[in-house]
Amino acid sequence: MFKLNGLAILLLFFNSCKPKQMVAQVLTEAPKTAAKVKVVSIPNPVNDTTFVSIKEYSSDFVFDMKYASPDNFLKQQVYDCAECFLRYATIKKLINANNEFITRGFRIKLYDCYRPLDIQKKMWKIVSNPMYVADPKKGSIHNRGGAVDITLVDKNGNELDMGTNFDHFGKEAGHNYLQLSENVLENRTLLREVMLNNGFTAFESEWWHYNSIDGNLLPLANFKWQCN
């Protein structure tokens, strides 16, 4: 006969009491559990420099895309259809600005957004004057997806009085021109202050034109959207 020490007795007791069926159950159920797991494909986040349609991110804007009709200083339609594409980073800033305007009872109306370089060349052929059209050799921030032409509308969709029409190429359209009614000056100030507070800079000679603060760092582009 031989004596079992305490450890040997404990091991024998454990093995004799261990539920072997439990081990088998775990092994057979594991594949069933794994089969129920669904792999969800999560799309990559949109890069800040990607061109996207603002309509995909907000329904709170009003649109009057001037260059998709002859209602502009060129007196010609140069866009095939009315769309507003911008770099994603610019759209985020614009939505923030519009949200602030909405709290004050107004909304942004868009006249122009991203402009493909081919369209800039087309406009240059019509009016080859750098006072009115940016030379496509240099391009504008519109061609980079970082500029917008805008105004404000009230709750009834009426445009606020800004003193001149869109694309009025005269001193009266400049931010520094003060020989305007108090109402017009207040409207321009409201537009300017909110846009500057949300990451844009003003174009001093055009009350309607605003550039994303990093717009001049973006490359010129000739991306073209599809017309339905």
Image (cartoon, grey):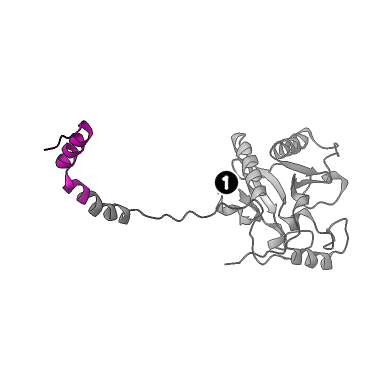
- Residue 10 visible in rendering: yes
Image: magenta residue range: 1-24
Question: Residue at image x 67%, y 65%?
Answer: 224
Is residue 86 inside the magenta stretch? no
What is the three-letter code of the residue carrying label 1?
Asp
Of residues 14 and 116, which is closer to you in this image? 14
Percent across and percent down for residue 167 are 79, 53
Q: How many marks overall?
A: 1
Q: Quadrant of residue 107?
A: top right
How far across and down, in percent of the image, does residue 32 sit? 27, 55
Q: Which of 212 and 35 is in front in this view?
A: 35
Can you see residue 162? no
Badge 1 marks a residue whose secondary structure is: loop
Q: Which residue is drawn at 42% across and 54% down?
A: 40
Residue 84 is situated, as x and y percent measured from the top left of the image, at 64, 56
Q: Quadrant of the N terminus?
A: top left
> Can you identify the residue that label 1 sits on?
60
